[in-house]
Amino acid sequence: MKSSLSKEQFIHKLQFEKEFKIYEELWKKLVDLKEATEKIIPINGYREPGKDDAEIDKERAQIVAEAYSEVRKIINYNKPFYDEKVYENTEKILSQSFRQVLAVRYPNRDESKHFEKAEERIEEIFAVIYKVEVAIRERILNIGKARLIE
């Protein structure tokens, strides 16, 4: 019985360490993606001097695309090893960020609605990132309570 309990504790420890590492890496990349997405449409109208709008938009969209790709890799490579709620909410963040890039790359839009929609997408990203944070915290707190099914 002692051996079985020791084995179970060892497996829980490995699981916790794996999940914790994934969450730590995922969280950093999500923050990078959120910040890149925020900057893609400068709500305050700030533009870098010496660059035209198309060039600035392309550079910012590229930064979001790279951050998006990093998050996508983490969630796809590690999907079986972490909580489903984290996965679902991370997918929502990716979707909103992708929409933000599309809005910039395909500029056939009404400017007033474009900025309004941009703000809505950013607010949605904030809300879903909070859900990811809560899901990660819940999972970390509850992982020690999980029991193996024999």
Image (cartoon, rainbow, N blue to C red):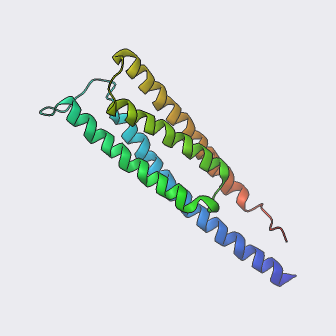
x 41%, y 17%: residue: 113
Q: Position of residue 42 (x, y in %)?
A: 31, 28
Quarter of the image with the N terminus is bottom right
Q: Position of residue 8 (x, y in %)?
A: 77, 74
Q: Position of residue 137 (x, y in %)?
A: 63, 50
Q: Is residue 55 left or right of residue 93?
A: left
User: Can you say whether 78 is above or below 138 in the image?
Assistant: below
x 73%, y 62%: residue: 144
Between residue 58 and residue 19, name the one nearer to us: 58
x 39%, y 21%: residue: 114
Between residue 26 and residue 84, name the one nearer to us: 84
> Going by the picture, which residue comes out furthest to the bottom?
3
Q: Is residue 92 left or right of residue 58?
A: right
Task: Specify the quadrant of the image occupied by residue 34.
Answer: top left
User: Can you say whether 99 is above or below 4 in the image?
Assistant: above
Quarter of the image with the C terminus is bottom right
User: Can you say whether 80 is above or below 57 in the image?
Assistant: below
> Going by the picture, which residue comes out furthest to the left?
50
Task: Specify the quadrant of the image occupied by residue 61.
Answer: top left
x 60%, y 41%: residue: 131
Q: Is residue 94 left or right of residue 5?
A: left
